[in-house]
């Protein structure tokens, strides 16, 4: 995919819409516009967002972030380092660990690091499908359909990573915003803990500061329990500036506390055009998340539903095909004009051209026949690959206590598994394992029958399942 010339980053929560527009045509991205709209409880975000975006140029790409408190996050250690396998594992873990129906879970992950045993540590992020549908509807109505929807945590972490944090004591990063605050605990550039704190600066100052300290102490204690006594050594504040807050927090928490202006901290990596003044802190909002997403490099989490992503990919492919066809037509038109000019000069050339075309008829038919044969070969190879994958998956999920007698497929869609178990109770567990596999669906027990054998009493069974179409 071509690099977008104009990137629009949106940070959307219940009380605020923030937009940062970035020009990416130069050697470094450059902020060309910042805008903010405050929302009340009764406001419809779509028209407010549309009005805010109408003043700027239409973006080539839109990235949107939802607030941390709208998602559930789990820290997982998974036995793989390949991104494709990690994505499948996270999807299965999300369906089993998150308190949503399986069909309502949308999940992705943020990689944290790798272990020496070939495992990866990731932050699993899950949201409810209804929330994402509503978010996309607002952006679609505003004329800004996003290519990526991520979590504010990723933007805040990218903002912090752009400052190249050194390795050393664990550092807490606290982003103070109007409606809420977000806390990260980092080991260098890696995020180990994230939490949304209901301590937005819109609260009265005394009430807000006391609530903030209580939430921080509770979060640090929870982190220490999870990490077996590891403690935070420093605190970095960003977002809304409160005079003297860093000194008061240092005294209350017993930590080294530093405040960093969100725009000033990344100005070297993300400069601002003269016409795009840095976001003012007097607005009582934080700009760390959208600025961080404007700086983010490489893979971003994407919480768009798979169906939406597939539709966007198909649309891009259709546009590319139309462009290619248009260019090919223009080229043929130019070639046709040139050919007509030459033909008009020589009738003999026309006869020669007709003769050459006749000579190509037979090679063209041979190519067509070879193409049909190639399609048949590819079809057979794909079927063999599917069978190999199914057998490998059966080997993985079948416990040693079960003995498989046969595995048959009908019409490449339905499968029948026959075997025997030492205990009738092993069969439901096996069915659950098959249902959890991404390759099988609609698993059901057709029958189970006890019989006596030399090794004792066995239970024969037959299970039917549909093969998932991918």
Image (cartoon, helix red, strand yellow):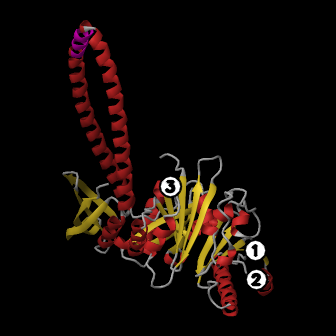
Q: Return the disc, 1 or 2, that comes first in the chain's sequence.
A: 2
Residue mark closest to the camera, 1 vs 3: 1
163 lies above or below 41: above
411 left or right, relative to 269? left
Which of the two discs, 3 and 2, labels the residue nearer the N terminus?
3
At x 35% / y 32%, what residue is drawn? 330
Depicted 63 relative to depicted 105: above or below: above
| Residue at the (23%, 57%) spot, across then down | 415
Classify mark 3: residues with Cα within 10 Å, few (<14), some (14-19) or many (20+).
Answer: few
Which SS class for mark 3?
Answer: helix
**Can residue 239 be seen in the rendering of this structure?**
no
Q: Position of residue 363 (x, y in %)?
A: 24, 19
Q: Nearer the viewer, mark 3 or mark 2?
A: 2
- 413 left or right of 293 in image: left
Residue drawn at x 31%, y 18% as measured from the top left:
339
- Where in the figure is residue 51, as x and y percent of width and height? 48, 69
Provide the residue span drawn in magenta.
349-357
Cα separation, mark 3 vs mark 2, equals 41 Å
Q: Quadrant of residue 347?
A: top left
Instruction: Residue under label 2, please give it.
Output: 245
Q: As rendered, which of 326 and 446 lies closer to the eye?
A: 326
Image quadrant where one finds the C terminus: bottom left
What residue does disc 1 label?
259
Which mark, by number, is residue 83? Answer: 3
Q: Secondary structure at mark 2?
A: helix
Whether 129 is drawn above or below 109: the answer is below
Residue shown at the point (67%, 86%) measured from the top left: 212
Q: Earlier in the sequence, mark 1 or mark 3?
A: 3
The picture places residue 236, in percent across and down from the top left corner, at 73, 73
């Amino acid at each position: 995919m071509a690099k977008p010339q104009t990137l629009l980053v949106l940070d959307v929560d219940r009380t605020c819409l923030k937009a940062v527009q970035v020009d990416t045509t130069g050697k470094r991205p450059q902020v060309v516009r910042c805008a903010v709209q405050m929302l009340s409880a009764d406001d419809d975000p779509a028209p407010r967002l549309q009005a805010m975006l109408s003043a700027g140029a239409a973006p080539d790409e839109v990235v949107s972030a939802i607030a941390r408190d709208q998602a559930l996050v789990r820290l997982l250690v998974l036995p793989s380092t390949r991104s494709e396998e990690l994505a499948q594992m996270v999807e299965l873990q999300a369906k089993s660990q998150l308190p949503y129906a399986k069909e309502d879970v949308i999940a992705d992950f943020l990689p944290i690091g790798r272990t020496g045993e070939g495992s990866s540590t990731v932050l699993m992020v899950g949201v409810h499908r209804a929330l994402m549908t509503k978010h996309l509807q607002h952006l679609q109505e505003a004329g800004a359909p996003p290519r990526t929807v991520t979590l504010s945590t990723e933007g805040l972490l990218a903002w912090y990573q752009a400052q190249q944090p050194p390795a050393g004591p664990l550092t807490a990063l606290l982003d103070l915003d109007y409606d809420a605050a977000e806390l990260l605990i980092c080991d260098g550039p890696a995020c180990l803990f994230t939490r949304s704190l209901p301590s937005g600066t819109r609260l009265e100052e005394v009430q807000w500061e006391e609530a903030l300290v209580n939430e921080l102490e509770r979060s640090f204690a929870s982190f220490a329990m999870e990490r077996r006594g590891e403690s935070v050594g420093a605190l970095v504040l960003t977002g809304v500036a409160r005079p003297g807050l860093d000194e008061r927090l240092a005294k209350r928490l017993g930590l080294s506390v530093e405040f960093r202006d969100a725009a000033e901290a990344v100005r070297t990596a993300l400069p601002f055009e003269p016409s795009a003044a840095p976001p003012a802190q007097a607005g009582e909002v934080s700009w760390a998340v959208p600025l961080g997403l404007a700086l983010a490099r490489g893979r971003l989490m994407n919480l768009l539903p798979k169906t939406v992503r597939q539709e966007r990919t198909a649309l891009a492919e259709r546009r590319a095909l139309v462009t290619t066809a248009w260019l090919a037509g223009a080229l043929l038109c130019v070639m046709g004009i040139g050919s007509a000019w030459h033909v008009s000069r020589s009738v003999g050339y026309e006869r020669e051209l007709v003769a050459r075309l006749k000579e190509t008829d037979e090679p063209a038919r041979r190519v067509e026949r070879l193409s049909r044969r190639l399609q048949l070969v590819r079809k057979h190879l794909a079927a063999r690959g599917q069978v190999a994958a199914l057998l490998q998956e059966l080997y993985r999920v079948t416990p040693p206590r079960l003995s498989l007698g046969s595995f048959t497929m009908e019409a490449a869609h339905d499968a029948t598994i026959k075997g025997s178990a030492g205990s009738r109770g092993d069969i439901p567990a096996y069915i659950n394992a098959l249902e959890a596999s991404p390759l099988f669906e609609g698993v059901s027990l057709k029958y189970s029958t006890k019989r006596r054998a030399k090794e004792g009493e066995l239970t024969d069974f037959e299970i039917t399942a549909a093969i998932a179409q991918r």
